Image: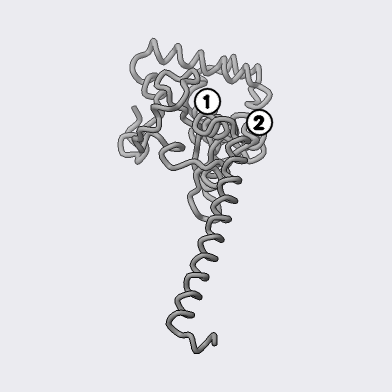
Amino acid sequence: MQPELLISKKPPHALYQLASACRGLDKQLQSWAQHWLKSHAVITKYKQSHDTQPGRRFLTGKHGLLFWIKRRCVFCGKQTHRSAILANGLRCCIACDQWQWPDKITKTQAKEEYDLREHHLLPRYHHHPSYAKLAKLGIPSGMIVPRYGTCQVDNVMTTMFLLSDVQRLAEAIHGNYEMYVARRKREAQDREVSRGLRERVARRSDLEWMRMHEPSRYF
């Protein structure tokens, strides 16, 4: 291992560590990296002449795969230092991020528009008995864990979720979401009517009290 990596703040890439284990693994990984670069030559700009260059390393080094993925969008090959919102380990330009994951929603929107709670969206940080009621939609634990990532919006860290995951989660918790929204709307209207009735009764009661105790104001 190179001495500067020993004092680096960030640990070296797992593939680099694996290649450093022994010569056999290093050779296999160099071959795999070469194959990857050649297979994606449209974005990596790999040239056939690279095959014959003596001593060329395809995993590490200035022209290696690990160097390339730190500075290039993995989908189009454009130079970028931006990470994908839902896959922070991948370099990804804005255009490719929107193309690969077109429908994303913020945590605030998910809570307000789909009536979800923090423990629904981020179950790994919360434990709640309501998960026992969730349908086991092909997930071993029975929990629906929406994919999410973080990004900076106006210098504020924002949590983003994949919209389709949030919709599946909302249906698992609330049932048919359109019917749930309609029911919530009716309940809100009923509460509004009940509140109006209580206010009218309270005003009538106050008026009767004043008539009994302050008759001079009414007679």
Number of the label disc, if any, that sits on residue 76 = 2
Q: Quadrant of the C terminus?
A: bottom right
Residue 3 visible in the shown view: yes
Badge 1, how many Cα within 10 Å: few under 14, some, many 20+? many
Q: What distance separates the C-alpha of mark 2 from that of mark 1? A: 15 Å
Q: Which amino acid lies under the numbered mark 2 shown in the image of this protein?
A: Cys
206 over 39 or under it: above or below: below
Determine the residue positioned at 34% across, 14% down: 22
Q: Nearer the viewer, residue 154 or 209?
A: 209
Left or right: 118, with 38 as reference point: left
64 over 188 or under it: above or below: above
Determine the residue positioned at 58% across, 40% down: 183
Could you tell me if the residues under marks 2 and 1 are in contact, i.e. CB atoms within 8 Å? no
Q: Answer with the quarter of the image where residue 92 lies.
A: top right
Left or right: 94, with 214 as reference point: right
Q: Nearer the viewer, residue 135 or 102?
A: 135
Q: Quadrant of the N terminus?
A: top left
Q: Of label 2 and label 1, which has the lower sequence position?
A: 1
Residue annotated with mark 1: 65
Residue 151 visible in the shown view: no
Badge 2, how many Cα within 10 Å: few under 14, some, many 20+? some
Q: Which colour style is shown?
A: one colour
